Image: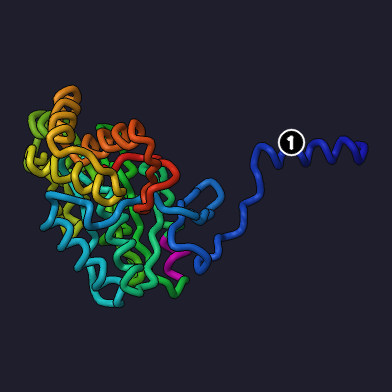
């Protein structure tokens, strides 16, 4: 076989299964995204988030999660947290905001985002983090499980179980629209068809029990919705007549059929665009927003 043929075979194999990239320098960034295909942590240059003070109507959840995060950042015991409830009410925004607050208070804690579909690899991620001297918030957004989903078993052992369990330098935060991380109809169907209904869903529901903090998020009132909009306008220096702002914001949420922090941000984004004011999610009036708070 010729040298040229061997070279082409080697290149083809490399395209099919590329060599794992080196592990990220965990001291070089504040945030990372986990890529299980190569067991790599890619640094995030700019975190998409808004200030903690702009999250309205979730005071109890804010204070509880911030206190838990600061204890963890100080090396004290802290709980895993499940932020569950209404869509668009700031669950993921709160996780990123408390991380920023911890950094602002001088704590060197890092955040790592794990995708829901990558949970089977989370044990490998924990092994990487366990060997580090840093402290990590591992964050999974929109966590839930379907009828035939077995990925929750990987997470159960890491959160509270197995021989090693969760590393002391890691805490796990997740958001979900479901308190028990599984659809209500799935729970009811399994109970009705099981020989022992009380035990039929215990295995899956027990995953949510491994979160020491359950923080509920509920739909906001109209006053809270308007306060969110006014807060965004103030933070980015957008001046508008109060009556006009009130009327436009109410019309905007009426066309969406819902009120939430996300809807308030979407209205503000539209308003800022019409007024020629650039926005981005670190609080300065320039650049552009990539994602609504939610």
Left or right: 49 in relation to 260 = right
Front residue of 184/230: it is 230
Looking at the picture, how far across and down is residue 142, in whole percent?
29, 42
Nearest the eye: 130 or 247? 247
Which of the 4 image quadrants contains residue 194? Answer: top left
Residue 6's spot in the image, x, y percent?
A: 85, 39
Which residue: 43% across, 58% down? 31
Residue 152 locus on image (x, y percent): 29, 46
Q: Which residues are magenta?
A: 126-131
Q: Which of the colour schemes (rainbow, by chain, secondary structure, one colour) is used?
A: rainbow
Q: Main secondary structure of the magenta part?
A: helix
Q: Which residue is mark 1?
A: 12
Q: Is residue 156 visible?
A: no
Q: Is residue 212 above or below residue 176?
A: below
- In the image: residue 19, left or right of residue 74: right
- Secondary structure under the numbered disc 1 in the rendered image: helix
Mark 1, other Cα within 10 Å: few <14 / some 14–19 / many ≥20: few
Residue 130: within the magenta? yes
Asked if the stretch drawn in magenta spans residue 64, the answer is no
Q: Does any portion of residue 93 appear in the rendered image?
A: yes
Q: Residue furthest right?
A: 2
Residue 242 vertical position relative to residue 69 in the rendered view, above or below: above
For the N terminus, give its image quadrant.
top right
Q: Is residue 153 left or right of residue 179?
A: right
Asked if residue 288 is positioned above or below residue 82 in the image, the reply reads above
Question: Residue 44 at what x, y percent from top left?
Answer: 48, 54
Q: Is residue 228 left or right of 195 when viewed as pictured?
A: right
- Residue 248, placed above or below residue 165: above
Residue at image position (25%, 45%) is 233
């Amino acid at each position: 076989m010729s040298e040229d043929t061997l070279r082409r075979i080697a290149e083809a194999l490399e395209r099919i299964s590329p060599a794992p990239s080196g592990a990220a320098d965990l001291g070089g960034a504040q945030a990372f995204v986990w890529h299980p295909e190569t067991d790599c942590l890619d640094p995030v240059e700019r975190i998409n988030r808004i200030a903690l003070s702009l999250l309205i109507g979730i005071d109890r959840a804010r204070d509880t999660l911030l206190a838990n995060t600061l204890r963890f950042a100080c090396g004290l015991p802290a709980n895993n947290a499940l932020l569950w409830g209404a869509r668009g009410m700031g669950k993921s925004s709160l996780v990123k905001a408390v991380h920023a607050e911890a950094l602002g208070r001088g704590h060197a804690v890092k955040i790592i985002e794990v995708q829901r579909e990558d949970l089977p690899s989370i044990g490998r991620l924990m092994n990487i983090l366990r060997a580090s001297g840093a402290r990590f918030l591992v964050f999974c957004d929109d966590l839930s499980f379907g009828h035939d989903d077995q990925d929750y078993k990987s997470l159960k052992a890491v959160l509270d179980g197995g021989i090693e369990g969760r590393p002391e330098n890691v805490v796990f935060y997740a958001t979900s629209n479901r308190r028990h991380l599984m659809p209500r109809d799935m729970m009811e169907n399994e109970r009705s068809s099981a020989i022992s209904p009380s035990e039929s869903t215990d295995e899956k529901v027990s995953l949510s029990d491994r979160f020491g903090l359950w923080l509920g998020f509920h739909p906001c009132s109209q006053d809270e919705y308007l306060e969110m909009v006014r807060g965004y306008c103030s933070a980015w220096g957008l001046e508008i007549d109060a009556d006009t702002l009130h009327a436009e914001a109410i019309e905007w949420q009426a066309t969406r059929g819902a009120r939430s922090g996300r809807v308030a941000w979407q209205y503000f984004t539209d308003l800022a665009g019409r007024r020629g004011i650039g926005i981005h999610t670190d609080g300065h009036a320039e650049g552009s927003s990539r994602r609504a708070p939610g």
